Image: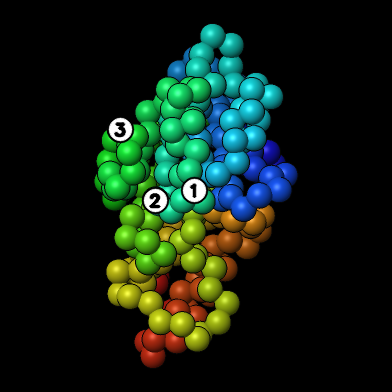
């Protein structure tokens, strides 16, 4: 966990195997109506064990909900294990995986911890990729969506560019990636630079995300 108001724990931060990050989002005060949520489940069973080491609230489930950022194996392999241990409801943008209980819609808001996160469909890395954005704290879970683009050498489809334009219209203070450390400073500016790089590489005019 770090300095953002919403409580976020990276359960695979010390993992020694290849896995996505697995984030546990809890309420600030562990109230009974807070929705303890895993963002992705990864490949490392140690993430399940880590949940029991975190204060998730007395008299309530350790994990109420799982939200999958997309269907790739490094983000989803432990899904059946997580369901067996915690029996959460599982949310995803597509039902391509066994065990998904509810299909998400672009633009809807879902409760995670004691906050609401907007579901943003960001196809590109995969057709079912989503980001999750909390306006209250400016927090973005990006999964494997390539939201930080530092060069102009790649090409992207129009629907991904449109998704990036939507992201750039939001104030983002922290980005939690599917792999690696979070970005905790200069996030909105970095997103706009990324969109400029994408548009320049595509031969389009930069700076049209306003």
- Distance from the alpha carbon under mark 3 to that under mark 2: 14 Å
In this figure, which residue is indicated by the disc labeled 2? 71
SS type, badge 2: loop
Disc 3 packing (10 Å; few <14; some 14–19; many ≥20): some
Quadrant in which the N terminus appears: top right
Residue at 51 percent across and 51 percent down: it is 74
Task: Estimate the x, y position of residue 25 in percent, counting from the top left.
Answer: 55, 34
Residue at 33 percent across and 43 percent down: it is 97
Task: Estimate the x, y position of residue 183 in percent, counting from the top left.
Answer: 63, 57
Q: In the drawing, does residue 71 fall left or right of residue 21?
A: left
Task: Estimate the x, y position of residue 15 in percent, counting from the top left.
Answer: 69, 45
Quadrant in which the C terminus appears: bottom left
Mark 2 and mark 3 in contact (Cβ < 8 Å)? no
- Distance from the alpha carbon under mark 1 to that under mark 2: 7 Å
SS type, badge 1: helix
Residue at 46 percent across and 44 percent down: it is 76
* Quarter of the figure with residue 121: bottom left
Name the N-terminal-most of marks 3 and 1. Answer: 1
* Quarter of the figure with residue 118: top left
Mark 2 and mark 1 in contact (Cβ < 8 Å)? yes
Q: Is residue 27 above or below residue 171?
A: above
- Name the disc covering residue 192, or none: none
Name the N-terminal-most of marks 3 and 2. Answer: 2
In this figure, which residue is indicated by the disc labeled 1? 75
Residue at 39 percent across and 90 percent down: it is 203
- Name the disc covering residue 101, or none: 3
Disc 1 packing (10 Å; few <14; some 14–19; many ≥20): many
């Amino acid at each position: 966990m770090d300095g953002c108001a919403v409580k976020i724990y990276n359960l695979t931060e010390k993992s020694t195997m290849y896995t996505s990050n697995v984030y546990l989002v809890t309420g600030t005060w562990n109230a009974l109506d807070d929705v303890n949520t895993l963002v992705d489940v990864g490949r490392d069973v140690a993430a399940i064990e880590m949940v029991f080491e975190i204060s998730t609230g007395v008299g309530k489930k350790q994990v109420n909900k799982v939200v999958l950022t997309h269907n790739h194996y490094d983000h989803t392999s432990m899904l059946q294990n997580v369901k067996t241990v915690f029996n959460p409801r599982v949310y995803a943008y597509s039902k391509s995986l066994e065990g998904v209980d509810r299909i998400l819609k672009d633009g809807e808001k879902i409760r995670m911890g004691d906050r609401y996160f907007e579901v943003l469909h960001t196809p590109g890395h995969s057709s079912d990729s989503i980001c999750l954005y909390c306006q209250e704290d400016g927090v973005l879970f990006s999964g494997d969506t390539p939201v930080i683009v530092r060069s102009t050498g790649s090409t992207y489809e129009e629907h991904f560019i449109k998704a990036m334009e939507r992201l750039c219209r939001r104030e983002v203070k922290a980005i939690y990636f599917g792999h690696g450390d979070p970005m905790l400073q200069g996030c909105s500016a970095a997103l706009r630079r990324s969109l400029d790089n994408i548009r320049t590489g595509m031969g389009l005019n930069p700076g049209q995300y306003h």
